[in-house]
Image (spheres, grey):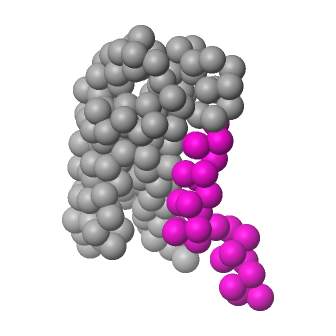
Amino acid sequence: MSKKIALAFLAAWVLGVVILNTAVAGGGHRLAGHHGMMMGDFGDPDRMLGHLERRLDLDDDQALRIGNILDAISPESDALQERALAAREAMATLDTADPDYDVQLQDLAREIGEIATSMTLLHGRMRAEISAQLSPEQVDRFAQSRARMRDRAGRHHGSAERQKSDTE
């Protein structure tokens, strides 16, 4: 496989991981994705807050503080989603015959890596800030809820174990 093609596959794979990680970690609905599903970071902060209120039995004070956290993070999340969408569109329009293809591909791979890093840090900060507002029991339920979302996403997108067993 040529170096150009390998780098293109790597960049596309990283972008896919960014988008999937965003959907799994945030559970939101922003970017149009695979099979018409909506994928993205946090989606609507009110929707996420409603989900947390139902799952964690938040009191009014907790709901207000967590709503403020989600509202504060939303602009950064939206900006990262826009960058991810632009990178995905740029990957789709790269011309392998262009003499600057390698440079463009490397620039996109770098951008995708920066987006993935920023999203991971933002998700971690959001989880920490939300967890700081919760009781120990609620923190456990929050972790269980995130684990269920990861499991559902793995079943929908195909977990590594299932893909391995399908090829055996």
Q: In this view, does 43 lie to the left or right of 128?
A: left
Seen from the viewer's position, the closer of residues 37 and 84 is: 37
Q: In this view, does 10 lie to the left or right of 29?
A: right
Q: Position of residue 61 (x, y in %)?
A: 42, 11
Quarter occupied by the C terminus: bottom right
Q: Position of residue 8 (x, y in %)?
A: 43, 64
Q: Which SS does the magenta portion mostly show?
A: helix
Seen from the viewer's position, the closer of residues 111 and 39 is: 39
140 within the magenta span: no
Snapshot quadrant of residue 69: top left
Q: Is residue 4 left or right of residue 1?
A: left
Q: Residue at left 31%, top 39%? A: 47
Residue 94 in sight in this render:
no
Q: Position of residue 88 (x, y in %)?
A: 30, 57
Q: Residue at left 53%, top 60%? A: 153
Span colored in magenta: 143-168
Q: Which residue lies furthest to the bottom in this view?
A: 168
Residue 168 in sight in this render:
yes
6 relative to 25, above or below? below
Quarter occupied by the N terminus: bottom right
Q: Residue at left 55%, top 51%? A: 149
154 relative to 52, above or below? below
Snapshot quadrant of residue 50: top left
90 relative to 134, above or below? below
